[in-house]
Amino acid sequence: MKRLLVFLILWLPVYAHAAINVFACEPEWAALAQEIGGDDVKVYSATTAMQDPHRIEARPSLIAQMRRANLVVCTGAELEVGWLPVLLQNANNAAVLPGKPGYFEAARFVPLLEKPTRLDRADGDVHAAGNPHLHTDPRNILRVAEALTARLAEVDPANAAAHRARGQTFAARWQAAIARWEARAAPLKNMPVAVQHKSFSYLLAWLGLREVALLEPKPGVEPSVSHLARVAAQLQTTPAKMVLRAAYQSPRPADWLASRTGIPALALPYTVGGNDRAQDLFGLFDDTLDQLLKAAP
Amino acid sequence: MLRPALLAAALATAFPVHADAQLDALRAELQELKSAYEARLQALEARLQQAENQTTDAAIKAEPTAQAAAPARSGFNPDISLILQGRYAHLKDVGERRIEGFLPGGHGADAARGFSLDGTELVMSASVDPYFRDLLILALQDEAAEIEEAWFQTTGLGNGFSLKGGRFRSGLGYQNEQHPHAWDFADNTLMYRALFGEAYGNDGVQLKWVAPTELFMEFGAEAGRGANFPGTDRNKNGIGSHALFGHLGGDVGASNSWRGGLSYLATKASERDSELEDLNDVKVETLFSGTSKTWVADFVWKWAPNGNASEQHFKFATEYFRRQESGLLHCDGGICSVGSDGDYKATQSGYYAQGVYQFMPRWRSGYRYDRLNPGPVDFGLNNAHLPVTDYKPSRHSLMLDYSPSEFSRLRLQYSKDKSMESVSENQWFVQYIHSLGAHGAHKF
């Protein structure tokens, strides 16, 4: 009995500081949850910047992590439609099912761009709710941060004040960073660019870049050489200053086009961990802007 | 928002040619205005929401919180998907297809030669309420629709438990829960054909538990009617078959993942009907009554560079089984004449191993090896009537498939089939698999 008591006393402080488990579908939300949750959360990212978030399999390790999660933070808008429902069905974790406080979709707090006017798979990999790559606009991250702060406080009431404090600090730092980035990016306004996949629509909308060509013939469909040749011809009449792709995407189409047309091809980090400099959310946008400004004429 | 749009339209008509640049600028500004406006609206909504949340009392707060917008998972409720499959098969005309040394059962190999429809499946699933999720899989055939699965699963039991009930594919092994469209080859493995016909399904209940550990661990127990091969249907209360299974799994670095498991199935048969050939190669009817116990070990390993499977990936899967059957065998016709009863005791085993490699986007190639061991079979008194073989059925298969998208696949397969002692067959298959409707699941 005495031993049990000693054991309990030894364990009590551990339990009092037990961090809640956050399962993030993508690295950007893992980074954001870490910013807001600090030491009060243990964050697991289901994917890395080198993986295509559309094409993930419901691996056993992901099911195991989902089972332990107190909060699931995903993009939504059907980005994870192939694997997130499978994880939720197999993990038997009632606290993180859709509709529960433990389930958080970023897309619900952001106005989505490029909602398709017709839903037909003949148009490729269309997302009914709109383009899901919403984190490439830092203003969206701010919106999600506000909602996520409230959610963390709800799921982890013991540390609610700490979550709110960290959330506010992050929001202030982030707003200052946005102002800085916007000032730096002023010369990029109206610059025409070509993109490999519609990964950067929000980034382009934020900075006022113009997308004049898309390398994929349809969303999610690999470009063929003949299609790329057509894009190259199209770029003769409507020239672009650079070709953008995400770090996880195949370098071949963008590089082929770059060598054919002489337009620089950029591998943007796309998310946290996409390259050495993009180690957190601030680094992600610092590096993205550096690359864009460096390539801009 | 209408006025700037009108203005833009008016401008466009007024300066059709040289206003292009200005128009673009205007459009950009408009977009900017729109998103700023939406952002402010969003912020206001969020504040409103916050205010509402603060004023609601504790009772309401305990309910799941409403989110800003309606979920956008699917326009349909329930999710509906349709699988269409067809094939061209170039096969020998060997009459009845059996696997040498095994009592045939279930639905045997589909041996249609030439063009045929390979399988049409209708899948519907949805949440029933906050407590259950249901699923229906119909296999559509000419003049028949077979209910392959129709089950409910609890969603809110908590502590990692879930209960499934109805008709479902058993969680044993690896391939068992996969329907034919998810197979990596055009036809079934010899192992599953010998064990269950296609796969083991049951009417019953399944309790599953997932451990709260970093290493994936799931354990399940099933109890059911046991009407399907290797059992038989029965007019009795109680349990006709039960199964136990456990799986472990995890990642090794960013590029490798694996899952392994062990399963056990026990079922009873009463006058289970199989056609055999006696020592004079004359067809006889046999009826088996007794117990059937099956062990299955499974292992799957997957590799993709940095875990990014879109360019290249490799999958290795293997399963091994051991089945013990003992009881009575009644033999009718041929040399058994009006009927002969004897003991029956058999310990049979087998395995398959397969590797599938995506060497470039859209293209995969694969190799599969099947091998069975009919093992020592003892017919007791019927040893005088029925042949005992030590022939070991085997098969090599090579496949190449091309997937224009996630929803369509075209496959070419060649097999050297030696599952029957007297036949060594070259088989060719061309197969298409299409899936319509709700987005398919990326299962491991």
Image (cartoon, helix red, strand yellow):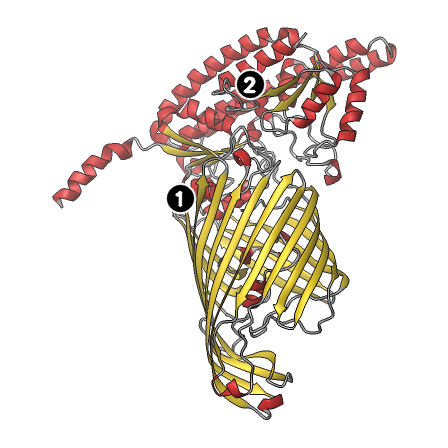
Would you say residue B76 is visible in this rendering?
Answer: no
Q: Which chain is mark 1 on?
A: B
Residue type (three-letter) at the residue carrying disc 1: Leu
Q: Percent position (x, y) of residue B3? A: 75, 15
Are callouts 1 and 2 both on one chain?
no
Q: Disc 1 designates what residue? A: B215
Residue type (three-letter) at the residue carrying disc 2: Pro
The secondary structure type at the circle numbered 2 is helix
Label 1 Cα neighbours within 10 Å, binned few <14 / some 14-19 / many ≥20: some
Q: Percent position (x, y) of residue B181? A: 64, 53
Q: Residue at x 59, y 88 (%)?
A: B332
Q: Percent position (x, y) of residue B183? A: 61, 53
Q: Disc 2 designates what residue? A: A138
Q: Percent position (x, y) of residue B35? A: 64, 18
Disc 1 to disc 2: CB gap under 8 Å: no
- Front residue of this view, candidates B41 and B165: B165
Q: Is residue B415 left or right of residue B294?
A: right
Tag on residue B272?
none
Rendered image quadrant of residue A265: top right
Would you say residue B241 is visible in this rendering?
Answer: yes
Rendered image quadrant of residue B21: top right
Label 2 Cα neighbours within 10 Å, binned few <14 / some 14-19 / many ≥20: many
The CA distance from mark 1 to mark 2 is 35 Å
Q: Residue at x 49, y 15 (%)?
A: A174
Q: Residue furthest left?
A: A2
